[in-house]
Image (cartoon, rainbow, N blue to C red):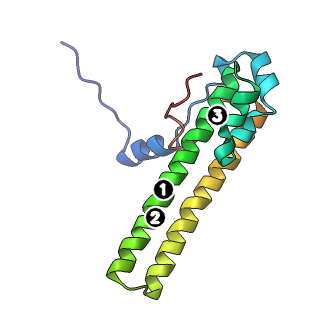
Amino acid sequence: MSRPVVDKRTRWQKIKDFFLKTYDETEKFKEDDVDSSAFFAPISYLGILFFVPLLIKPNSAFAKYHANQGLVLLLTEIAVNVVICLIVLLLNLVNFWIFPTFLFTAFLFTVCNLFFVIFIILGAYNATSGYAKEIPMVGRWKIIKH
């Protein structure tokens, strides 16, 4: 009879790993593919321009990987900003534009979008450097197959 596997990580380590642990998939890509696509891959992180590397290098797995990362980041940005707008709307319905409500939502909007700017810079840096590392928190989702 075998013993059950016990995870000895603390709760905080599990939370940290869930949000911050990213995987490096650079070894899956051919070196010539990475070299030829590293110039175009950072464009994937500029919002709606995620599709540009797919048009320029349609057969490049490295370009598809970063296009997927850019698309997932864009969709997450849109979803988070819609949720923030709904929070603003609900708070305005409850409190007819009270000053602290405005400060709270402005702070929330600023902090969330600051994280997205950091993720954009991180993704563009990885693409330029020839790495295929996931973006923290949202990089695990796959929409475009590479």
Distance of label 3 from label 1 (alpha carbons):
20 Å
| Sooner in the amino-acid sequence: mark 2 or mark 3 | 3
The foreground one among 60 and 24 is 60
Q: Which residue is mark 2?
A: 84
- Where is residue 42? Give x, y as percent: 74, 39
The secondary element bearing badge 3 is classed as helix
Distance of label 2 from label 3 (alpha carbons):
26 Å
| Sooner in the amino-acid sequence: mark 3 or mark 1 | 3
In the rendered structure, find residue 80 and report the number of the disc placed on it: 1
Say which residue appears at 22% left-offset and 15% top-offset. 2
Say which residue appears at 55% left-offset and 36% top-offset. 22
Say which residue appears at 60% left-offset and 53% top-offset. 116
Residue type of the residue flagged with mark 1 = Val
Q: Is residue 118 above or below residue 108?
A: above
Q: Which residue is mark 3?
A: 67
- Where is residue 139? Give x, y as percent: 54, 38
The secondary element bearing badge 1 is classed as helix
